Amino acid sequence: MFIVFNTLSQAKNYAKRQKTYFWQEGCGCCWASLQVFVEDNKVLEFYTHSHVGNVRAGMKVIGKIKCGRKG
């Protein structure tokens, strides 16, 4: 999925509507998290997870802002 936003405001509203996700097993060795945020003219999704102590993290661009971002 890739989304093109017309304005910075649209992108911020989209990121605000996406819920920050965190899940954890009772033992604490397995967990997952997901966060969506705006940086420069991109909307990014950052995710981390651990399974039996093996931690992985990644980030992907899920959208961009047409007009760019000043400042």
Image: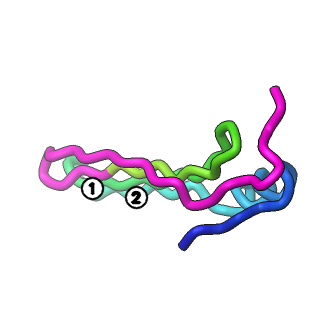
Q: Secondary structure at mark 2?
A: strand
Q: Nearer the viewer, residue 14 or 68?
A: 68
Instruction: Please name the colour scheme applied to the rendered image.
Output: rainbow
Residue plotted at (74% across, 55% down): 16
Residue plotted at (43% across, 48% down): 59
Indicate the position of residue 43 as horizontal and vertical percent values.
63, 52
Q: Residue furthest bottom?
A: 1
Badge number at residue 26: 1
Badge number at residue 37: none
On screen, residue 68 versus residue 45, left or right, reads right
Q: Residue furthest top?
A: 71
Indicate the position of residue 12 as horizontal and vertical percent values.
78, 51
Graded by Cα atoms within 10 Å as few (under 14), some (14 to 19) or many (20 or more), the crowding at tag 1 reads few
Q: Quadrant of the C terminus?
A: top right
Magenta span: predominant SS is strand
Part of the protein shown in magenta: 49-71
> How far apart, in angstroms, are the residues tagged by discs 1 and 2?
10 Å
Disc 2 designates what residue? 23
